């Protein structure tokens, strides 16, 4: 048994104190602890860490972006983070969500920043406020309002007067708002750090001397705000001494702040990655995330933030890009829908517990570095009271290794760190995932006509439709020879811009006689395009770039006489990072038709007639007060595969309380709303079947986003999150705008349901239990591994689908027995778990035949159904 600062790690879990009692006990202890911290007071720092109210701190921080969920979800998300062992919530501030036009501020709904910060305070957690106000973040235009690009003379992120003026004004506004509400730690609030700019170091040189001046100006502008807590700048390689420079990367153990009196802070550890439409789904294995975090604290780190801990959703048109998906799930520890992602969330929770057990020694001890082999090392922290904590790591990417450390042997899997809060007993190894995993399903629920709709009692859902005109509707906005830039024209008020022209075809054209087709050849800066010829959708394409632009060719039907060419150009999220990113344009650059008697006809310098946006958007058809602006066509059989169609239906909320996704796999591309709330862009664009995907991810070795993809040949995003709080009990208006054609009768809701739990633990896994200290301070080195299962709220283990103690193989959902199998396995697990919402099974002789196949390291694998 190991005694660490009032807690005892038991080698033998005390089964009277259930794991969950202990877990809650831990949360209780942590929350009392955190509560006193949340009224933070004075925040300073030294080379080792932040010092809050005179105390050095090790801090685990979790990024949750407030507009990427809804206020109804915030308390639950913050609570789940806290239960995951997090001390701090981090968020950017989203300028373009707040300053809608110069001086016109919005802080309602998802943008209620003050409410969010107060929820964090109420939970007893700290907050890091990354004001930016440039943020990148895969957010539209990197968070900077589009209107600022059109303020004459403005150049973003350099020594430019208009930019600095508006940046300072907004920063000051946010700072004053926080001050008014007493939210800075210096005022007794939760905010312990603030950030100015974001990763400017990568781009500074592109802006020449002005870049350097701007970076220094940003720092001093921030510091002059007098917030009473330190300012940080991330990836700012020349940050002045008045701010703390911090690291963003998949690994930051080797990071050294610019000055020896600054603490080592990691603002962005990416525990997954974002997705783009048409691409595969990236995953970062939990073993590697844990490895990176453990290495950071091993090497003297003091604040570590997961970017993201909950990624959430890019509702409406907030995603950056181009092509960032509406889902910003990020493979984060809390999934897009707000459920803890297992085993990642659980594995990191254990890691945080293990690190916290070392906190005193880490912060007060002197580090000693020891080499234990070519790629193996220990960092040992011993303080004056004799407390000792050690991290031993094996950074070999392939080979496990047994090392000798302080007269004992330790087996270290490849690419792993073991944590020894007493310098003797391993309580956690980053590569040994004991945490349960869950079986999560999207359970389809047909759309149900609302009981409150006028058709009460009618079974079939009633769809109403409105079809957009192809090309210019109403009055043209303007006519111009040649092309305009798409973004300069829409100012991003809409994704859509019509470019229309016509071409006269003489009867003598050979293709008319031969019945062949000429070829439409389009070049565009992006991002997507639908080409209509004589009202008919002939082609759709997407791509991005100025040099070269994206190009596509498509044979089209032309008739003798006048032919109408109507090209619907679309943006799919504006650029969110890069030097001079605000100048990146979009839209058509060349339109030609090949195959005429005289060769190719270039329409590029034709007179083009332009129309900004859709009629339905203009009328606000998706809002309750705009719906009556037209006569919808009511139809029990809505048209299928019909482009440019608005669909509307009045539906009931799906039963239950699970989170909801809108299943759009049978639709093309467009926008969706519920009760006027913007669900976002949908586009179930499939990644190529020829792409490379992995069945299982090898966690070992340096992670890059292209390492572990799943979802080859599947839509990047099939389901679109609709927060429960957007639903009324009945009479919900679902509105869809479909661009190219789909089958609305196949749209359904899906409930995100956790239907089962799985876990695998091997005999040699450390046991990790918190218990009140034993009176005699008994120390035993024997550890019993155990499995802990926990079904979601209001459900119990109804069936044990699989249990094998021995050498089972496979993964959750496909376990099978190995050569070595204890036949008692199922009955033991059933006895301990059936009809319980949680249970613990130790790998001990009382439960299993430990003597079985003595040469093998045995493990227990369990899969159970929760219902
Ligand atoms: C960082 C940036 C973040 C986010 C991240 C990738 O470089 O600071 O805002 O864009 O990359 O998710």
Image (cartoon, grey):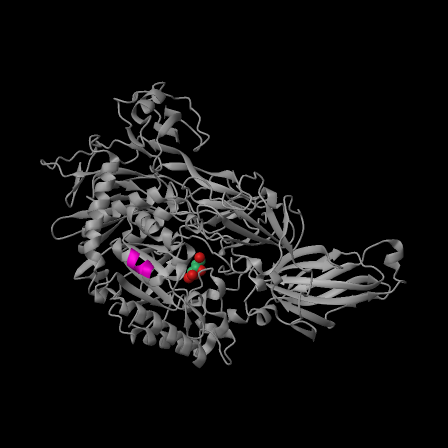
Give the residues in magenta: 115-119
The answer to which quarter of the image holds residue 494 is bottom right
Is residue 438 part of the magenta span, yes or no? no
The answer to which quarter of the image holds residue 415 is top left
In the rendered image, the vertical position of residue 212 relative to residue 73, given as above or below: below
Q: From the viewer's side, name the closer residue of 852 and 100.
A: 100
**Extreme-left residue of the structure:** 776
Tell whether 726 sits left or right of 537.
left
Instruction: Residue 196: give x, y in percent of width and height.
Output: 36, 69
In the rendered image, the vertical position of residue 647 relative to residue 777, given as above or below: below
Instruction: Residue 457: give x, y in percent of width and height.
Output: 54, 39
Tell whether 652 sits left or right of 424.
right
Ligand 1 quadrant?
bottom left
The answer to which quarter of the image holds residue 817 is top left
Q: Is the magenta stretch mostly helix, strand or loop?
A: helix
Total marks shown come to 0
Instruction: Residue 16: give x, y in percent of width and height.
Output: 20, 30
Residue at the (33%, 49%) spot, across then down: 76
Instruction: Residue 49: give x, y in percent of width and height.
Output: 24, 60
Q: In the rendered image, is residue 177 in sight?
A: yes
- For the N terminus, the image quarter is top left
Q: From the viewer's side, name the closer residue of 329 and 251.
A: 329
Q: In the rendered image, is residue 690 in sight?
A: no
């Amino acid at each position: 048994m190991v005694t660490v600062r009032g807690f005892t790690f038991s080698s033998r879990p005390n089964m009277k104190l259930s794991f969950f009692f202990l877990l809650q006990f831990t949360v209780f202890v942590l929350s009392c602890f955190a509560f006193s911290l949340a009224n933070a007071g004075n925040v300073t720092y030294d080379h080792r860490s932040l010092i809050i109210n005179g105390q050095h701190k090790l801090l685990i921080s979790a990024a949750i972006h407030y507009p990427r969920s809804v206020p109804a979800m915030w308390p639950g998300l913050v609570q789940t983070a806290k239960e995951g062992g997090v001390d701090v919530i981090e968020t950017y501030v989203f300028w373009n969500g707040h300053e809608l036009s110069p001086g016109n501020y919005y802080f309602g709904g998802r943008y209620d920043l003050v409410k969010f910060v107060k929820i964090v305070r109420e939970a007893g957690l700290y907050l890091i406020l990354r004001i930016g106000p440039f943020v990148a973040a895969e957010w539209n235009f990197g968070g900077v309002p589009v209107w600022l690009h059109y303020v004459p003379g403005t150049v973003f992120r350099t020594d430019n007067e208009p930019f600095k003026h508006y940046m300072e004004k907004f920063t000051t506004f946010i700072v004053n708002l926080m001050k008014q509400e007493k939210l800075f730690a210096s005022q007794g609030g939760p905010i312990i750090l603030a950030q100015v700019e974001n990763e400017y170091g990568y781009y500074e040189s592109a802006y020449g001397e002005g870049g350097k001046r701007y970076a220094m100006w940003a720092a001093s502008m921030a510091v002059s705000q007098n917030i009473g807590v330190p300012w940080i700048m991330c990836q700012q390689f020349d940050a002045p001494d008045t701010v703390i420079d911090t690291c963003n990367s998949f690994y930051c153990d080797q990071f050294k702040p610019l000055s020896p009196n600054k603490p080592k802070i990691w603002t962005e550890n990416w525990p997954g990655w974002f997705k783009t439409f048409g691409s595969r789904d990236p995953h970062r294995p939990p073993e590697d995330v844990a490895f990176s975090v453990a290495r950071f604290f091993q090497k003297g780190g003091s604040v570590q933030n997961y970017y993201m801990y909950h990624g959430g959703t890019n509702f409406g048109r907030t995603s950056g890009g181009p092509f960032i998906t509406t889902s910003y799930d990020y493979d984060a520890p809390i999934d897009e829908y707000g459920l803890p992602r297992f085993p990642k969330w659980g594995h990191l929770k254990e890691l945080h517990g293990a690190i916290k057990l070392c906190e005193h020694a880490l912060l007060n001890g002197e580090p000693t570095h020891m080499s234990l082999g070519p790629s193996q090392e220990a960092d040992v922290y011993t303080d004056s009271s004799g407390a000792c904590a050690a991290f031993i790591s094996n950074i070999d990417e392939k080979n496990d290794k047994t090392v000798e450390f302080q007269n004992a042997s330790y087996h270290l899997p490849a690419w792993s760190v073991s944590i020894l809060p007493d310098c003797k007993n391993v309580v956690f190894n980053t590569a040994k995932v004991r945490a349960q995993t869950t079986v999560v399903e999207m359970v389809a629920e047909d759309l149900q006509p609302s009981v409150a709709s006028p058709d009460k009692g009618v079974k079939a859902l009633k769809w109403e439709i409105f079809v957009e005109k192809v090309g210019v509707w109403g009055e043209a906005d303007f006519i111009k020879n040649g092309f305009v830039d798409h973004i300069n024209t829409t100012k991003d008020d809409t994704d859509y811009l019509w470019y229309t022209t016509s071409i006269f075809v003489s009867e003598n054209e050979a293709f008319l006689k031969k019945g062949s087709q000429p070829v439409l050849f389009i070049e565009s800066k992006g991002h997507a395009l639908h080409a209509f010829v004589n009202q008919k959708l002939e082609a759709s394409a997407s791509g991005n770039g100025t040099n070269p632009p994206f190009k596509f060719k498509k044979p089209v039907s032309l008739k003798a006489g006048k032919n109408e060419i109507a090209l619907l150009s679309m943006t799919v999220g504006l650029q969110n990072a890069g030097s001079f990113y605000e100048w990146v344009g979009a839209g058509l650059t060349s339109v030609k038709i090949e195959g005429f008697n005289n060769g190719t006809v270039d329409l590029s310098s034709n007179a083009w007639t332009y129309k900004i946006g859709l009629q339905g958007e203009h009328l606000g058809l998706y809002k309750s007060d705009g719906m009556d602006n037209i006569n919808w066509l009511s139809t029990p059989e809505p048209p299928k595969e019909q482009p440019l169609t608005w669909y509307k239906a009045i539906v009931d909320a799906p039963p239950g309380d699970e989170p909801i996704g809108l299943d759009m796999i049978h639709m093309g591309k467009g926008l969706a709303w519920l009760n006027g709330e913007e669900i976002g862009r949908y586009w179930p664009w499939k990644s190529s079947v020829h792409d490379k995907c992995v069945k299982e991810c090898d966690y070992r070795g340096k992670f890059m986003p292209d390492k572990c993809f799943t979802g080859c040949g599947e839509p990047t995003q099939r389901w679109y999150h609709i927060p429960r709080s957007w639903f009324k009990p009945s009479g919900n208006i679902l509105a869809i705008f479909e661009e190219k054609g789909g089958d609305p009768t196949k749209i359904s809701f899906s409930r995100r349901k956790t239907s089962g739990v799985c876990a695998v633990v091997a005999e040699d896994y450390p046991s990790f239990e918190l218990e009140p200290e034993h009176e005699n301070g008994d120390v035993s080195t024997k550890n019993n591994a155990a499995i802990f299962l926990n079904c979601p709220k209001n459900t119990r283990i109804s069936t044990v689908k699989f249990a094998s103690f021995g050498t089972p193989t496979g993964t959750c959902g496909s376990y099978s027995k190995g050569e070595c199998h204890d036949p008692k396995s199922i009955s033991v697990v059933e006895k301990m778990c059936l009809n319980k919402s949680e249970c613990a099974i130790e790998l001990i002789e009382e439960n299993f035949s430990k003597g079985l196949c003595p040469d093998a390291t045995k493990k227990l694998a369990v899969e159970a159904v929760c219902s």
